[in-house]
Amino acid sequence: MKKGMKRFLGIVLAMVMMLSMSLTAFAATPNANGDITVPVTVTIEDMPDASLLPAGYTGPTTAGDLFNSTVTLNRQEFVQAMDFILGTDVPMVLTGNDEYIQSVDGLANIDVEFGANYYKGYSWMIYMKAGNSVELVGTVPSWTTAPTANSWFESPLNAANVTLDGSQFFPYTYGDNTAGFATSVEGIILKYVYTEMTW
């Protein structure tokens, strides 16, 4: 009887552990119907001063989330991160063959100052959560770091080029597949941030 009870308790404990796992543990894995569920957040982290906004602006005026939930899509063929971002139904304007996000809910990218070797401005940036493993390919350049398992990273690819069904390769330098990392994508954040860059 004791042996049978231990086995039963072991099975119950295993089921409880599986059910208590977070949604992101299953995020990019299609279910039996081919549905993929991914947590998506669309948020304004840095709100520009009103003087930088265009005349007649009617979009958001404070920092905060515009969307923070999950998006479920059926895997017809390949579903990209952009499909999940658009699945939030937050109004967006895309450019460049629908690969780049120009504005969200009326809040557009804003160039504050730029020159030959620097840039300052506000833009919509895409961050992704790495899966349970990250496979490194080649050498990590000195100007960046590779993500670790289950951590958030700024995507080096635009959302239209990231497939959410299994592992995705991210090159450190666009077009150079000799160095990068491969991981599944377990979550997406589209974040409006102020950026200063020099090169």
Image: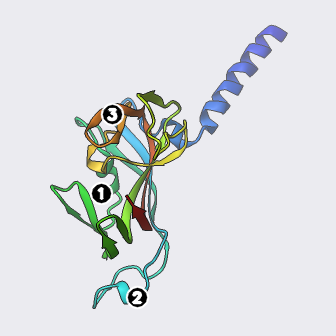
Secondary structure, mark 2, is: helix
* Residue 14 placement, left or right of 146: right
* Residue 105 placement, left or right of 181: left
Q: Is residue 194 above or below residue 34?
A: below
Disc 1 residue type (three-letter): Leu
Direction left: furthest residue: 97
Disc 3 residue type (three-letter): Gly
Q: Nearer the viewer, mark 1 or mark 3?
A: 1
Secondary structure, mark 1, is: helix
Mark 2 Cα within 10 Å, few/some/many (few <14, many 20+)? Answer: few
Which residue position holds label 3? Answer: 34
* Residue 4 placement, left or right of 26: right
- Give the x, y percent position of residue 2: 84, 11
Disc 2 residue type (three-letter): Ala
Residue at (50% x, 42% y) in the render: 145
Residue at (45% x, 77% y) in the render: 47
Measure the C-alpha gap from mark 2 to mark 1: 27 Å
**Residue closer to the observer: 117 or 186:** 117
Q: Are marks 2 and 1 in contact (CB under 8 Å)?
A: no
**Residue closer to the observer: 9 or 54:** 54
- Give the x, y percent position of residue 87: 32, 55
Marking on residue 86: 1
Measure the C-alpha gap from mark 2 to mark 3: 45 Å
Which residue position holds label 2? Answer: 50
Measure the C-alpha gap from mark 1 to mark 3: 19 Å
Secondary structure, mark 3, is: loop
Q: In the rendered image, which quarter is residue 91 located in?
A: bottom left
Residue at (58% x, 42% y) in the render: 22
First-in-chain label (2 vs 3) = 3
Residue at (38% x, 90% y) in the render: 51
